[in-house]
Image (cartoon, rainbow, N blue to C red):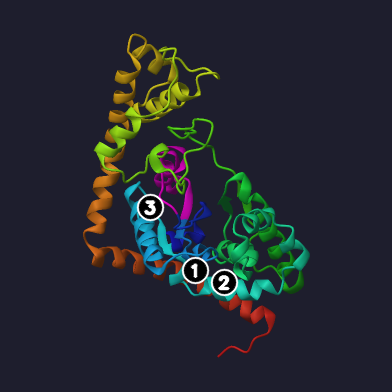
Amino acid sequence: MAEQSANETKKRIFSAVKPTGNPTLGNYLGAMRHWGSMSDEFDCLFAVADLHAITVAIEPKELRENTKRLFALLIAVGIDPEKNIVFLQSHVRAHAELGWLLNNYTMFGEARRMTQFKEKSQKTPENVNVGLFDYPVLMAADILLYQTDVVPVGDDQLQHVELCRNIAERFNGRYSPTFKVPEGRTPKVGARIYSLLDPTSKMGKSDANDAGSVFILDPPDVIARKFKRAVTDSEARIVASPDKKGITNLLNIYAATAGVTVEQAQSEFADSDYATFKTRVGEAVIETLAPVQKKYAELRADDGELMRLMRSGAERAERIAARTLEKVYKKIGFVRG
């Protein structure tokens, strides 16, 4: 069990994903399909960051469905809930408690410098709430609760990990060593996948026009239809080239799903027309996603089992989080029973 690994040599890794939007083929090929093997090297905790999801307006029904879907998908893509701790953030109250405590060790100027707050405020000026401003501190609590060694994040989140480090060092310096100071690490990116309709833009899970995005849970006929409509060009040559972005994107997708190199894919389709090529890419994607979709369907068919897995993961996470939180309360000076 992961919570027993304090005496082992593995470093602990914490990763949280917000239940917003609908995970895409790009999310799967670029990152998600590699998460299951991370437990070979690390002691892993994976959280569905549902507390973070409400910094933007979201309907209760949508939040519930997104949360269940993402939790089931984490397991369906290969994360073993026995080898890893997989849980919902809101099921471990220590996240919210430590978030409040750490607010008092975060300088306003530090929080104000976070560029994501500025960017998101511009996108939704009608909902610039305190949670949106403060969520990097909650993110710090998420990480520090578990005495995390490594936090895999995208480039856009490295600033938040640096704030987390500053908070940890400030707290440790004032009271005595309490938190591990984590390392932010940008993971190696797998295949970089772009929109089927606009191959200059990343395939997005929240795009207004979903025809360019293939979602992990799209039915086979929908996947096939999207690839048939994928943007190509007028040259009818299947080669990877900077000036053939649509074809290059499709070759990258095929290579990643068929387990070949881009060069091998080019050779395979050297004498094919675009229609045949796009059909075969769609088939390769359908074959790749089939076992994920099968496992996901099994999980969602048994809501009781899904909830059992959620409770089990939360209980295991809580055991680690409670030790850290109690230590923090005592260090600050709160009277404990």
Q: Quadrant of the C terminus?
A: bottom right
38, above or below 16, in the image: above
Q: Secondary structure at mark 3?
A: helix
**Side of 291 where 187 appears, left or right:** right
Please name the residue that numbered disc 3 is placed on: 74
Q: Residues within 10 Å of mark 2 (few under 14, many from 20)?
A: some
In the image, the segment drawn in magenta is 21-44
Residue 277, position in %: x, y? 33, 20
Residue to which mark 2 is pinned: 324
Say whether residue 14 is left or right of residue 183. left
Residue 225 shows which numbered tag? Answer: none
Dominant SS of magenta comes to helix
Secondary-structure class at tag 2: helix
Residue 22, magenta (yes or no): yes
Residue type (three-letter) at the residue carrying disc 3: Leu
Q: Which residue is mark 1?
A: 320
At x 35%, y 18%, the residue is: 274
Q: Is residue 179 visible?
A: no
Q: In front here: 83 or 15? A: 15
